[in-house]
Image (spheres, coloured by chain):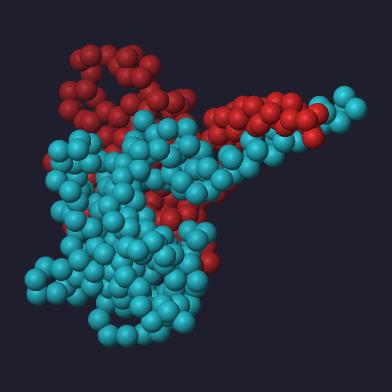
Chain colours: A cyan, B red
Amino acid sequence: MRVIVILIALLVGSATGLGLTWLASARSNGFGAVQVGAWTAWPRSGTSDADPYARAVFARSGQLPIERADGLVFEATATDNGSAIDGRCETRIAGRLPPARLWTLTAYDTRGRLIDNSAERYGFNSTEIVWNHDGTFEITAAPRARSGNWLPTGDRDRIVLLLRLYDAPLGLASRSDQPLEMPSITQVNCP
Amino acid sequence: MRRYAVPIAVGLVLGGLVHLTTVLALPRLALEDAFARVERLGPANQVHLIPAPTPFESVLPQLDPSFAHAACRYDLSQTPLRITIPLAPDYMSVSFYTRHGLPYYALNDRAASQRVIDLLLMTPQQRAALPQDEEITAADRLIVESPAEEGIVLVRAFVRERGVLEAVTARLKEAKCVPLV
């Protein structure tokens, strides 16, 4: 009887412990997330002050994160109203960006791989994109080719967008900082 | 049912401990971390070009496809390193990572006075041992202190459009990461 009791304790212990670690290192980039609309950034994770969760994520994924002095990465997995970004829909990413020397917007699948397409178009950068006259831009992520800034989604059901701002003097530290202006993400024509 | 309440409670506490230990240990246990991936590119203290990421293959996950990358896995156990990176006309940056993929320093092309980033990478001990009046310090070269003997230097070079890829890659090929003798 005692053996069973000890076994239960050990089983519950290892299951919850390892499960929590797996979840934490797969789904988040640590503490100190900054949320602007549909976008999330982890400014502290790009410094040597990164918390143990951020360190675990980097080690597990094998990535070399962008250092804060180099740039800042924003991630979006959902639209403005919270539904997951679905590559089978038409997803409109539109608006303005915070000041930066340059930026890139890239679409990945949920495992961090680029999305295969015959146009070899994996994203846009600030120099090649077609801007609107008023200084805003609009990108449409969709499975099939269309005019304008088209970002192929390869019919994936889940898309992860990474927006990287390079050499961006953003103040994210204090509450008095200007609110950041980030592009909106809306989705139409879902199957 | 009551008799299982205690073992389950004990198990949950144990689970918390397991969770904390594994999170803290993960950087040391991960087999496919950035260091292992860069190690496959070639020997230490040399700059290696990282092939452009494709949907099927990428040396490192989540590389920016608008950039060309080069990496130098360094080992300072013998001597400090001199790192020189000729700059392309567009944005370029060099970032320094620990053995476990944690960034500790970065600078971009704006920080370079000439059209080249030229710096010395050394451990705090090696820096302390530098003679004050030697040529090295007189050259006023930037010194980056690595927290440990091993780590990674990653160069990111912006590729504005496909047409300039070749020119940018050519500059990256000229980058050097050599022991200081």
Residue pictured at 60% horizontal, 33% vertical: B19
Q: How many marks?
A: 0
Residue pictured at 34% horizontal, 14% vertical: B129
Depth check: give the residue in front, A48 or A4.
A4
Residue pictured at 48% horizontal, 67% vertical: A158
Q: Is residue B117 visible?
A: no
- Relative to A42, does residue A125 appear above or below in the rendering? below
Measuring from the top left, give residue A81's x and y in whole percent. Answer: 35, 63
Measuring from the top left, give residue B53's x and y in whole percent. Answer: 44, 62
- Relative to B163, does residue A33 appear above or below in the rendering? above
Residue pictured at 27% horizontal, 47% vertical: A71
Measuring from the top left, give residue B93's x and y in whole percent. Answer: 27, 47
Q: Residue furthest left?
A: A134
Instruction: Left or right? Give the position of A188 relative to B164.
Output: right
Instruction: Left or right? Give the position of A164 relative to A6.
Output: left
Q: Is residue A90 visible?
A: yes
Depth check: give the residue in front, B53 or A59.
A59
Measuring from the top left, give residue B59's x and y in whole percent. Answer: 50, 55
Depth check: give the residue in front, A68 or B44.
A68
Instruction: Left or right? Give the position of B32 relative to A137.
Output: right
Depth check: give the residue in front, B179 or A27.
A27
Q: Quadrant of residue A150?
A: bottom left
Q: Quadrant of residue B24?
A: top right
Q: Residue furthest front?
A: B2
- Relative to A103, does residue B96 appear above or below in the rendering? above
Task: Assign the N terminus of chain A to one quadrant of the image.
Answer: top right
